[in-house]
Amino acid sequence: SNRGAQIPSFKVMDVMRQAQAKEIALKEAGSSTKVLHLEVGQPSTGAPQKVKDAAAAAVSSDKLGYTGALGTPELRSKVALEYTKRYGVQVEPDEVLMTTGSSGAFIVAFTALFDAGSRVAMAIPGYPCYRNILQALGCEIVALPATAESNWQPTVAMLDEAAKGGRIDGLIVASPSNPTGTVILGPQMQELCDWCTRNGVFFVSDEIYHGLTLGNKPVTSLSYKRDSIVINSFSKYHCMTGWRVGW
């Protein structure tokens, strides 16, 4: 479609494809040279052994047929319990939707929250796939020019300025951020959540890098805005990128 043709490719995948082609060429040439991959957020280890053992047992003993569209009740309950254990936030299993990685979660969330023409704000620089998915849905991206002074994160002042150009329908934050790695601390998260509540703005929090920090510990937006939409997956912290399990 014309709309699809206007959406930029995900550059990380472009680089990865080129790197893989280089690896194949080197192997065919009998070279021992290795390609060092720095393009994707790939953990250096594989999935935990317990996960691999459980997967092998399931393949051997389970039909692995269709599940409910929201995911298995057992897994949804475990994910919900993790928020109580890690953050002290009560989450019900019915509030958890399992997806094919966090990318699937973004598609589901953005489709549910926004219509064509919705104005969705996010800090720039930021994860490009937010913009690509929103553009595919016909949304307007409202770029918030983050700087070192703002910790490469959005601020209420940025949102107030952006709102002068029209109503803001959604705000997407990432903490820790991709690509800058900065963390939104409790007071700033509270300010952003309160601004969204006052202005009737959907709040989407990408928390996929929780657990992979040094120093400042990230907070979940659910501690400050109970109706925020949290995106996460097993890919990073649990080293399960290829398993494609998110929520």
Image: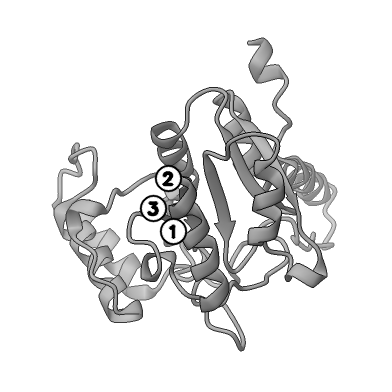
Q: Which mark is residue 105?
A: 2
Residue 204: horizontal and vertical position, in percent? 48, 51
Amino acid at dot 1: Asn
Name the residue tied to disc 1: 232
Q: Amino acid at mark 3?
A: Val
Q: Secondary structure at mark 3?
A: loop
- Dividing the picture into quarters, in which one does residue 43 lie? bottom right
159 and 94: which is toward the camera: 159
Q: Residues within 10 Å of mark 1 (few under 14, many from 20)?
A: many
* Residue 190 percent across, percent down from the top left: 49, 69
Please give the label number shown on residue 33. Answer: none
- Helix, strand or loop at label 1? It is loop
Tell me what residue is drawn at x 15 percent, y 43 percent. 63
Count of numbered tags: 3
Single out the mark in the foreground, 3 or 2. Answer: 2
Q: Residue type at mark 2? A: Ala
Query: Looking at the picture, does residue 120 appear above or below residue 222?
Result: above
Residue at horizontal 23%, vertical 47%? 71
Q: Does dot 2 land on a helix, a strand or a loop?
A: helix
Marks 3/1: CA–CA distance: 9 Å
Decide which of tag 3 and tag 1 comes sooner along the chain: 1
Cβ atoms under marks 2 and 1 closer than 8 Å: yes
Closest to the camera, between mark 3 and mark 1, is: 1
Q: CA distance from mark 3 to mark 2?
A: 10 Å
Disc 2 residue crowd, few under 14, some 14–19, many 20+, Cα 10 Å: many
27 displayed left or right of 74: right
